[in-house]
Amino acid sequence: MLKNLKPFFSLLLMAGVLSIVFVGCVDEPTIEPYQMPYASIKFANFSTNIDVVDIRIDTKWDYSGPLKPINQFTDLNGSSVKNNLATTEVTEYFDIRSGERHVQLFDAGENMIFENMTLQADGYGEIIYFIVGTYDDNEDNSTLEIFSIVNGYTYLDDFHQKPTSADDDDHIFMTSTQLSLKCVNALYDDYSTTVDGIKSPVLDSVICESNADTISIFRSDRVTLTQNEPEIKPGEYGLITEPFEAGNYDVFFVSGEDTLVSSNYDLAAETITYLVLYGYPTNPKLAKVEEAIMTEARPK
């Protein structure tokens, strides 16, 4: 009887060996490594009295270790990010881990002027951080601050490729002859003037004229971040949402009946252009910051 079963056991053993060999030859599914969410950011120095600012930022989830000078990062062009920003200078975009990031600011003498400011860097966002206000050794008198403008995202999904309205905040849609124009109020109070009752003015309107004809009158009650507010206060911006044609313009920033400052600018097509009101309340200035619009979506 056992002798008759021997061939059966031999076949069973052979089948078991073959199954082991077969399983060993099957490729296991490949699991793609988890990609850390990133944000693409840049900094702009519009402080009133910090002629050169050294910016450092953390790179770890737990904020451990020293913060990293931004010139140790690589921008999207493959170059080292510019640090030690002079007034009105702006970095190129560079990537950091998204989430809450800690930032420290130092002056040219490596004296810390801003300690552990927390910035929110939303995942896949394109964000510009404006350094504004006046530094004072007495912390109670210092108005140094950082505020951000989120330009959109580094990728396009189906919704953003097919916008349903002209004022889609996530991405800019325009023709090859147009630009996105953002008017920024970075005119922060400083202690020396507020004690005399001089406060930073709110921005009521921006008038752009070309060839003596008014091309666009921007009224901030239509486009401020908080729609219920009738003005652009310090730390806010207004976006001209209607199509804005490139060209040469005389620009006037107005508060009430007063023209705070005016200038003439060539506004280039296919750009995001910021017109920034900054400086002391008693001596406001105007600057232009221009950046090319990213035409290709980046992956998550």
Image (cartoon, grey):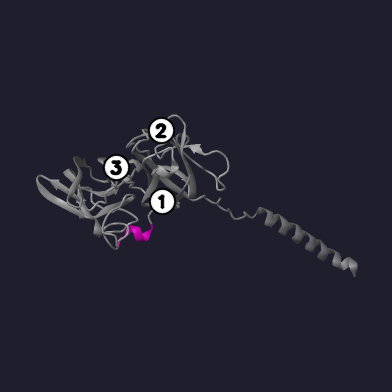
Check residue 159 for magenta coloring.
Answer: yes
Q: How packed is label 1: few (under 14 Cα within 10 Å), some, or many (20 or more)?
A: many
Can you say whether 43 is above or below 299 in the image? above
Can you say whether 20 is above or below 93 in the image? below
> How many discs mark residues in the rendered view?
3
Residue denoted by label 2: 84
Residue 5 appears left or right of 173: right
Please name the residue shown 36% across and 40% down the image: 134
> Mark 3 vs mark 1: which is more N-terminal?
1
Q: Amino acid at mark 3?
A: Tyr
Residue 232: horizontal and vertical position, in percent?
A: 28, 53
Q: Can residue 215 be spotted in the picture?
A: yes
Res. 260 mark: none
Give yes or no for contact between labels 3 and 2 (Cβ–Cβ under 8 Å).
Answer: no
Q: Amino acid at mark 2?
A: Asn
Residue 42: horizontal and vertical position, in percent?
A: 39, 42
> Mark 3 vs mark 2: which is more N-terminal?
2
Residues in magenta?
Answer: 157-163
Residue denoted by label 1: 125
**Quadrant the N terminus occupies:** bottom right
